[in-house]
Image (cartoon, coloured by chain):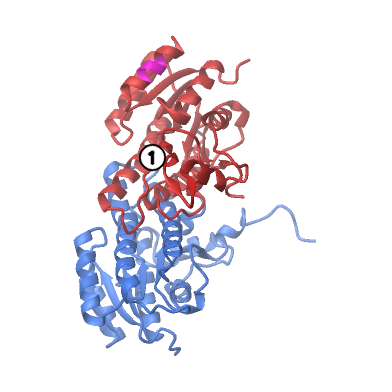
Chain colours: A red, B blue
């Protein structure tokens, strides 16, 4: 039997990168998939390609009303919600000295508050319908320091810890809801595309990022998506509040 | 009294009470000039007065960038330098969980606990890198007060937990940046367990100070809550040159909470 048979999943950042890769695998594994994203064109195109078991909803993760609307549309179409991937995020490089407060707050609002609101509305939707699984995309930068990403680092540290609160809160209340964080290394997605063309220490950005990984290469979105699918499925039924690292060895 | 901070200038946010109050007093005892920075005027002025000539009070709302700029200008005008920043100001935000937190509460908690630390780091680096002593054993030191809530999960306040996780990793980013820049500035986080400070006032009001202290103390393997001075000692170490090889690290002072998975065991000792 497919691992996500009959489950309905809401995937933020679903139009590209890790979100889109998760959507494709989830469909193959029998799930109903709601592609939720600000990128309407790419999201609608992907949902159409995935067929009748997919739906696109426009979602601004920083807007609570938008979350309420997205969850309502999910339930209206598929009956209930069984899993949430908080995959939407932005990466910005600016040192602590260069980063403005407005930019710091913008990144944290998307990557931090966006995940928090997703957890809130997924818990509210799933606690009375038998539970479910929430997967939050943090980063290796939620585990280790990086000099030019104070806002991103802060937001990913927040996701790492708020995930544990959700896990403990839901565990203690007997909701049957699990919540885990995933910590990817550098993955070849649109988020890092602008970095790949730059140069540093006589290397291209791609060569530099590859060199950070003991495995000598960037990760692929599919490699993270497979971990996400494991966590959204019942195969991970005793895992909650935990940190799942897929980073080609960076943090080793 | 030790004189390891003589000639150094320190800013302590949230310096009017709790861990900040104890830190101001300890840094001054070790010879530092201390700026008690807090939004609570009366308490802050009193702490400065009680410390004596080495301390002065400056009113600061850590969430407002213009107030940081004014503070740094005042410190440089008065002392010509900055060596130590302790980002201690913080709030619990009150009881909230993933289910019932509001965006308003999230924003209010993060304005103080995270934006305040971000702004402090940003503006302190600017001041320290041009004014602090630059020699192998010198340089500036930034100490950010996170929490055990930044290390392990809890069902406690949701927005607070997120903010303390953010401070933990922001600290490492700042440390990595300063190391890369070779500007001599170090940045570390401190992770206190339950400390008997006004942040617990709502609990004290509900169950009484002694009963509350005993309850929280019983959650610590060591059997009691910490005192503000216990954390001030950790801050002193990270602020002084004795920790000159320490940056981007996490100093835990929590009575053992994060050291084990349970307070009692089924597995009897032999």
Q: Is B3 on the left or on the right of A28, as rendered?
A: left
Q: Percent from the top left, x then y, of residue B45? A: 23, 77
Q: Is residue A99 above or below residue B192?
A: above
Q: Is residue B122 above or below residue B104?
A: below
Residue that extends furthest to the top in the rendered view of this protein: A52
> What predominant SS class does the magenta segment belong to?
helix
Q: Is there any visible trace of residue B99 in the rendered image?
A: no
Q: Residue at x 44, y 66 (%)?
A: B195
Q: Is A170 on the left or on the right of A216, as rendered?
A: left
Q: Residue at x 42, y 26 (%)?
A: A14
What residue did someone put label 1 on? A116
Nearest the viewer among A212 and B220 is A212
Using the image, name the chain to which the residue with label 1 belongs: A
Q: Residue at x 64, y 56 (%)?
A: B264
Q: Is there any visible trace of residue A33 in the rendered image?
A: yes
Nearest the viewer among B221 and A137 is A137
Q: Secondary structure at mark 1?
A: helix
Q: Percent from the top left, x then y, of residue A130? A: 50, 25
Residue that extends furthest to the right in the rendered view of this protein: B270
Q: Percent from the top left, x then y, of residue B99? A: 38, 38
Magenta residue check for B40: no
Callout 1: 10 Å neighbours few (<14), some, many (20+)? many
Give the image quarter of residue B55.
Answer: bottom left
Q: Is residue B150 above or below residue A69?
A: below
Report the span colored magenta. A43-47
């Amino acid at each position: 039997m497919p691992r996500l048979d009959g489950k309905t999943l809401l995937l933020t950042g679903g139009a590209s990168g890790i979100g889109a890769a998760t959507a494709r695998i989830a469909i193959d594994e029998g799930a109903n998939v709601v592609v939720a994203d600000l990128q309407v064109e790419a999201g609608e195109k992907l949902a159409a390609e995935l067929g009748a078991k997919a739906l696109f909803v426009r979602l601004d993760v920083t807007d609570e009303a938008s979350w309420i609307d997205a969850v309502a549309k999910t339930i209206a179409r598929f009956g209930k919600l069984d899993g949430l991937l908080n995959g939407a995020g932005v990466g910005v490089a600016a040192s602590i000295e260069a980063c403005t407060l407005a930019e710091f707050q913008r990144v944290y609002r998307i990557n931090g508050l966006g995940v928090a609101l997703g957890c809130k509305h997924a818990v509210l939707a799933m606690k009375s319908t038998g539970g479910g699984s929430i997967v939050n995309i943090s980063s290796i930068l939620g585990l280790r320091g990086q000099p030019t990403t104070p806002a991103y680092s802060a937001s990913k540290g927040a996701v790492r810890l708020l995930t544990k609160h959700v896990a403990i809160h839901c565990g203690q209340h007997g909701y049957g809801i699990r919540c885990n964080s995933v910590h990817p290394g550098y993955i070849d997605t649109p988020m890092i595309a602008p970095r790949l063309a730059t140069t540093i220490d006589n290397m291209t950005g791609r060569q530099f990022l590859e060199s950070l990984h003991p495995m000598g290469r960037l990760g692929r979105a599919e490699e993270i998506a497979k971990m996400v699918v494991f966590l959204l499925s019942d195969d991970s039924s005793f895992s909650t509040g935990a940190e799942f690292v897929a980073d080609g060895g960076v943090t080793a | 009294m030790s004189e390891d901070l003589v000639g150094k200038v320190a800013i302590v946010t949230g310096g009017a009470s709790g861990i900040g109050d104890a830190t101001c007093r300890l840094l001054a005892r070790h010879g530092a000039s201390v700026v008690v920075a807090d939004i609570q005027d009366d308490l802050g002025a009193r702490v400065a007065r009680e410390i004596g000539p080495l301390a002065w009070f400056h009113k600061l709302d850590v969430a407002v960038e213009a107030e940081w700029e004014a503070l740094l200008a005042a410190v440089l005008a008065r002392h010509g330098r900055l060596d130590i920043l302790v980002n201690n100001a913080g709030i619990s935000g009150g009881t909230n969980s993933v289910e019932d937190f509001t965006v308003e509460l999230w924003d209010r908690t993060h304005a103080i606990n995270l934006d305040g630390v971000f702004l402090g780091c940003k503006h302190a680096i600017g001041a320290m890198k041009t004014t602090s002593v630059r020699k192998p054993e010198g340089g500036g030191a930034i100490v950010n007060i996170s929490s055990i809530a930044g290390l392990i999960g809890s069902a406690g306040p949701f927005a607070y937990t997120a903010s303390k996780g953010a401070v933990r990793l922001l600290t490492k980013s700042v440390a990595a940046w300063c190391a890369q820049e070779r500007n001599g500035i170090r940045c570390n986080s401190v992770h206190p367990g339950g400390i008997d400070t006004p942040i617990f006032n709502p609990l004290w009001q509900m169950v009484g100070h002694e009963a509350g202290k005993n309850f929280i103390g019983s959650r610590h393997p060591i059997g009691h809550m910490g005192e503000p001075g216990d954390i001030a000692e950790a801050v002193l170490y990270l602020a002084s040159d004795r920790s000159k090889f320490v940056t981007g690290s996490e100093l835990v002072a929590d009575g053992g909470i994060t050291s084990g998975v349970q307070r009692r065991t089924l597995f009897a000792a032999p």
